[in-house]
Amino acid sequence: MSKSTAVRKQAHEFDQELLNLYDKYCHGHIDRRQFIEGAGKFAVAGVTGAALVEMLLPNYALAQQVQPNDPRIKTEMITYNSPKGHGATKALLARPAEGGKRGGVVVIHENRGLNPYIADVARRLAVAGFTAIAPDGLTSLGGYPGDDDKGREMQSKLQANSLLQDFVAAYETLRGDSQVNGKVGAVGFCFGGGIVNAMAVMLPELAAGVPYYGRQPKADEVPRIKAPLLIHYGELDKGINDGWPAYEAALKENKKEYATHIYANANHGFHNDTTPRFDKAAAELSWDRTIAFFKKQLA
């Protein structure tokens, strides 16, 4: 069965240790060869380790909830300047078709550039009534290459602070947009969740932050956070969740405005609807909460 016609597998169909191995691969801790070799341990009759790997990799045909030509929205690729980052940066800009001043949201990708899943998230936000900008952090290297493995390799070559500054510049771009009401928040996934946390530390005027399973800031950075936060974690995401108790303690100690949801039996990447780690119930509930949060904070 081809990727284009495949039905999405579900997490419960795989051994959790195999899913954890996929997580290491996604985060660049092992390469594809090591991933395939490790997956071989879980091979069964008629299904090789390489076949298991293919089942776990993203199928972007599954991610298109909002078509690029959806009449409810207007989209365009723009280029904005990131003077403290990598300079000219491309981004998908999505707005409600009916116009009017709106709250703005920066959509921050995972560790592989502006792939079709992240572009679709931006369109979903436009359908929900926001102006969304989804930068491609790989612009300076030629942009998202259409392949996640290559995208991960490219992003690993970028200087971390310069890449962060590219997303900060996207925030400033929305703040200066004539169709944005001046209130701009950010949502990010995996690497992008960590960037949302970092932006909350850096930007006192950030209106709202929604980090999905993102790395936490240091405890001594938390006093600088002004934005209200809505934080999403998957229960099975041990690598990220280990940093949560210290972050929570610092948020409480500094009397910050935040809400946290840890979704039962959900893996890292549970919102990404292109892989078996996708958890439909957790993804939909977290997204409903995210939209309600942005509607409250960005009105």
Image: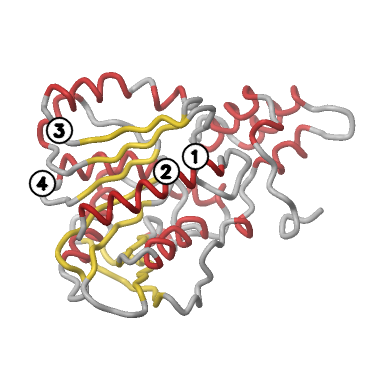
Name the disc covering residue 204, or none. 4
Going from N to C along the chain, the mark reached first, 2 or 4, is 4
Mark 3 or mark 2: which comes first in sequence?
3
Q: How many other residues sit within 10 Å of disc 2, few (<14), some (14-19) or many (≥20)?
A: many
Residue drawn where x is 23% and y is 53% of the image? 296
Question: Is the residue under label 2 in contact with that under label 1 (CB below 8 Å)?
Answer: yes
Name which residue type carries label 1: Ala
Q: Nearer the viewer, residue 143 or 184?
A: 184
Camera-nearest residue between 235 and 166:
235
State yes or no: discs 4 and 1 in contact (Cβ < 8 Å).
no
Q: Which residue is mark 3?
A: 256
**In terms of secondary structure, where does tag 2 sit?**
helix
The quadrant of the picture occupied by the C terminus is bottom left
Between the C-alphas of marks 3 and 4, the distance is: 13 Å
Q: Amino acid at mark 4?
A: Pro
Q: Residue at 50% across / 35% down in the picture?
A: 28
Where in the figure is residue 4, as x and y percent of width and height?
72, 60
Q: Residue 65 location, x and y as percent?
A: 54, 62
Secondary structure of the residue carrying numbered label 3: loop
The residue beneath circle 2 is 286
What separation in Å lies between label 1 and label 3 (alpha carbons)?
Answer: 25 Å
SS category of the residue bearing label 4: loop
Percent x, y for residue 188?
A: 36, 47
Task: State the residue position of label 1.
Answer: 282
* Percent coordinates x, y for residue 35 in the rendering: 64, 32
* Quarter assignment of residue 84: bottom left
* Residue type, numbered disc 2: Ser
